[in-house]
Image (spheres, grey):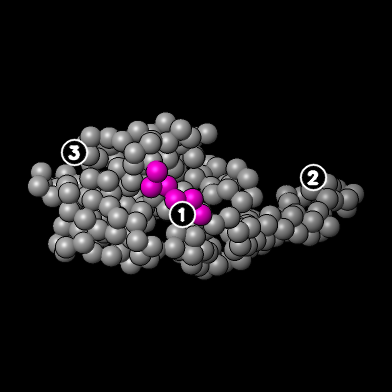
Amino acid sequence: MAISHALGRRCFPHRDHLRVRSEVAPDGDVVGGGGEHAQRRERTLTEDRYLGRLRSMTQQPPAVPAETADWTFVIGMGCQQCGFSAQDVESTGDRLRATIPFWRESLSREDASQRPEPTVWSPVEYACHVRDTCRIFRERLELMLREDDPTFANWDQDVTAVKADYFHQVPTEVADQLAAEAEATAAAFDGVKSDQWDRPGRRSNGSLFTVKTFAIYFLHDIEHHVHDVTR
């Protein structure tokens, strides 16, 4: 993780790197740097900058309000917020793959770890959620194809975001992880056979899905978060 990596580095640069160049004039005055006082001041400024960066990497951000909406309505009604409408489910894999370049570009930006508002996820936090959503939904899809009407284990995405420390994860690493999970999940949807789309499964709260409605619900989640980061 980024925190342990940062803490593992030496705290401050070698003192030689902090020295201000100075010369002694023939009359004994120090010129070109302010002497020892300037050196001490430069060391203090350098240490303050380092500590500021370290604090930003270890501080915990404000809590993001928990997600309470039931988004199953998008299966039949679409989503006015992001413009999503139910897809041909056989295109689920291709549409999922099409989002990968967006995340790579977003996570390559210098502000990928910055929140637009104190209680709104940063791009890297959204990407962590998308990465984990791909993995969780792939596992659920495999369960639906393997068992008759299974009940999914509960997944609290807000608890996961805190425990997995989404805020401090490294954007470039998350980009690679997201791409791998998205490719694997796309392949899983590609592999659904024509007679499997009506197989059932349900959430722990009782919401019933078929593989078809599950694919629609899943893809909306992924594409909606693209909208969240671009708006």
Mark 1: give few (<14), some (14-19) or many (20+) Cα within 10 Å: some
- Which amino acid type is shown beneath numbered disc 1? Val
Residue 41 image position (x, y, % from top left): 79, 56
Front of the two marks 2 and 1: 1
Amino acid carrying mark 2 in the image: Gly
Q: Position of residue 48 (x, y in %)?
A: 72, 58
Asked which secondary structure carries label 3, the reply is: helix
Whether residue 78 sits left or right of residue 123 in the image: it is left
Residue under circle 3?
90
Which of the pair 190/151 is nearer the observer?
Answer: 151
Q: The residue tagged with tag 1: helix, strand or loop?
A: loop
Which label belongs to residue 170? 1
**In the depicted view, which residue is nearer to us: 143 or 57?**
143
Gap in Å between the C-alphas at discs 3 and 2? 71 Å
Q: Magenta includes 70?
A: yes
Front residue of 113/158: it is: 158
Three-letter amino acid code of the residue under disc 3: Glu
The percent position of residue 139, horizontal first and vertical second, equals 25, 60
Q: CA distance from mark 3 to mark 1?
A: 33 Å
> Is 156 covered by the magenta stretch?
no
* Closer mark to the observer between disc 3 and disc 2: 3
For the magenta stretch, what is the residue range? 68-73
x 26%, y 55%: residue: 138
Q: State whether residue 163 is above or below residue 168.
A: below
Q: Looking at the image, is 202 positioned above or below residue 222?
A: below
Q: Residue at x 33, y 67 (%)?
A: 153
Point out the frontmost of discs 3 and 1.
3
Residue 105 seen in the current view: no
Q: Is residue 66 above or below residue 98?
A: below
Q: Residue at x 88, y 50 (%)?
A: 29
Residue 190, quarter of the rendered image? top left
Q: Which residue is mark 2?
A: 32
